Image (tube, grey):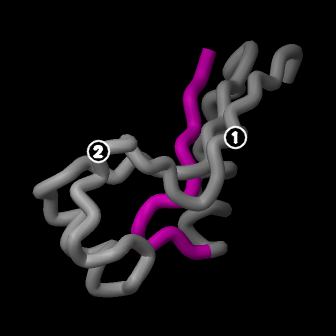
Amino acid sequence: MGFLLLGGSGETRETVQQSLDFVDAMQPDSLEVTVGIRIYPDTPLSKYAAEKRVIAPDDECNSWLLVYGSHSFLITGI
């Protein structure tokens, strides 16, 4: 079984393709894919997200904000 997280800071089409190529080379029996990232308070990521206006500067992320979606799915028989 493999796990793949997409949608992080700095993710590009190229890095996604690199991840897909890696998964292809590993040939897992199944793959869990998650799209989106959690932003925790008082972290470098929360400061970056505030600078990029993804979250409000005073947002303490108390709701454990999941940015860019909350999609997770399992692919089997690959």
Q: Amino acid at mark 2?
A: Asn
Q: Which residue is under mark 1?
A: 71
In what quadrant of the picture does the C terminus appear? top right
Q: Helix, strand, or loop for circle 2?
A: loop
Left or right: 58, with 32 as reference point: left
What is the x, y in percent for residue 55?
38, 71
Q: Nearer the viewer, residue 69 or 34?
A: 69
In the image, residue 4 sits, relative to residue 19, either above or below, namely above
The residue sitting at 38% across, 43% down in the picture is 63
Q: Helix, strand, or loop for circle 1?
A: strand
Label number found at residue 62: 2
In the image, residue 33 sits, relative to residue 50, either above or below, namely above
Q: Is residue 41 magenta?
A: no
| Gap in angstroms between the C-alphas marked 2 and 1 | 20 Å
* Magenta segment boundaries in residue numbering: 1-12
Q: Nearer the viewer, residue 15 or 26?
A: 15
Counting residues from the start of the chain, the first of labels 2 and 1 encountered is: 2
Q: Is residue 3 magenta?
A: yes
Q: Amino acid at mark 1?
A: His
Residue 1 figure quarter:
top right
The residue sitting at 57% across, 75% down in the picture is 12
Left or right: 6, with 13 as reference point: left
Image depth: mark 2 or mark 1 in front: 2
